Image (tube, rainbow, N blue to C red):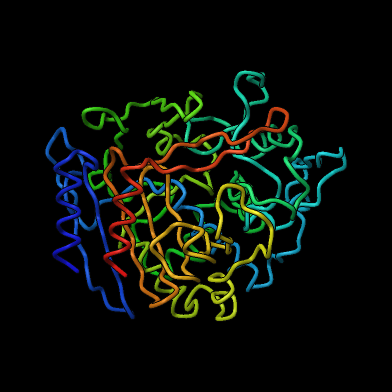
Amino acid sequence: MNALIDAVIESAIMAGKIVGTVVIVVKDGETVYSRAAGYADREIGKLTEMRTIFRLASVTKPLVAATALALVDKGRLALGDLARDYLPYFRPKRPDGEIADITIHHLLTHTAGLSYGADPKTTPSERMFNAGLADTDLDFEENFSRLSTFPLMAAPGTLWSYSIAIDLLGAIIAEVEACSLDQAVYHHVTEPLGMSDAGFSVSDPERLATPYADARPAAVRMGDYHLVPDTTGNPLTFSPTRLFNPKAFQSGGAGMVGTAPDFIAFLEAVRHGGTPILKNETAKAALLNQIGNIPRPGEPGQGFSFLGAIIQDAVLADVPMSTGSMTWGGVYGHYWFISGRHFRYDHVQHGGGRLFGNLSARYHSGDLWRLTLVAQKNVANFARTIWSLAL
């Protein structure tokens, strides 16, 4: 297995498909493969290391979700609680015009009826909300008050739609704990697990990977304001410097940084029954489908847990994983999965370039768009190959 994974990594780097990567495979609690390759900063020749720090993008989500679950375990939050009881400024309406009853469970599972963006061609600037990647000076209240003016795409609990829900959950966590989201995640998840480089600020700027964007013939270094068109031509804005803006709200869906070993520590904790961050029954629930038969448009054969997608039919899902596997990733180019067959864990983090997905509009309802994460083909193929070899 090791030689085959090495060959895949070398081929991807030589072909310019990725700039750098960290790959870790864990089986039955033992690390059976671990490698850093390529560059964390190509232009100055800085090599990727195991402790290279990456912008996590949506790898943030399971860490924030686990923080919410820890609060549930401690009786400070309940899955049936209404979001508006904690955020009174957030009272969006269902498509029929009635105030929506959005629960913590809806937010955790992306079944709240929310989406990930508004149509910039038809939405006034004063109504545009920030989805966590672009820079902003908005705080939780201003940002989600804007979001609240948009009608939901569907009644809560009737449709799965990847969305800004975990950002809202982050705001609720901060409200419940009366502290910053960073402090709450640190207290309940990252500090107990020894994830010393995981957070909403950079522990060591010298180890922070430079982000790159897909381009031909080779990846390009991202600037402070980098636009990447989605499949419909609408721009997705990346602002790598958002990380250093103290005024920007801490995005529960995209705002953290961390290392591959950090995240492996988190996955191992979940696999081992949640200790020391979650109760055993909560950790077990986090590995199971939590949306019943609610459809996931464009994602056949998949359900969704509290932490990521659950493979219910590997053939329909078209993935090299077994039934019961859980997986997700991040738009800066990260992928992870837990095998339902062997409880094997694989985490792949990239230094950038031809490795992040697009947010592609599938359909829209009014001015609120449903956006679906679509991985670039070459990156998806790279990850699929690693997964196949790891299994």
Residue 335 pos. (x, y %): 38, 54
Residue 386 pos. (x, y %): 28, 59
Residue 325 pos. (x, y %): 46, 68
**Looking at the rendering, in which quadrant would you find the N terminus?**
bottom left
Question: Image point 68% across, 35% down: which residue?
Answer: 147
289 or 313, which is in the foreground?
313
As drawn, 168 above or below 366: below
Question: Image point 44% across, 37% down: which residue?
Answer: 358
Left or right: residue 51 compared with residue 120: left
90 or 231, which is in the foreground?
231
Asked which quadrant contains residue 19, the reply is: top left
Q: Is residue 175 visible?
A: no
Question: Image point 54% across, 30% down: which residue?
Answer: 137
Q: Is residue 104 visible?
A: yes
315 or 270, which is in the foreground?
315
**Looking at the rendering, in which quadrant would you find the C terminus?**
bottom left
Residue 283 pos. (x, y %): 54, 74
Left or right: residue 356 compared with residue 207: right
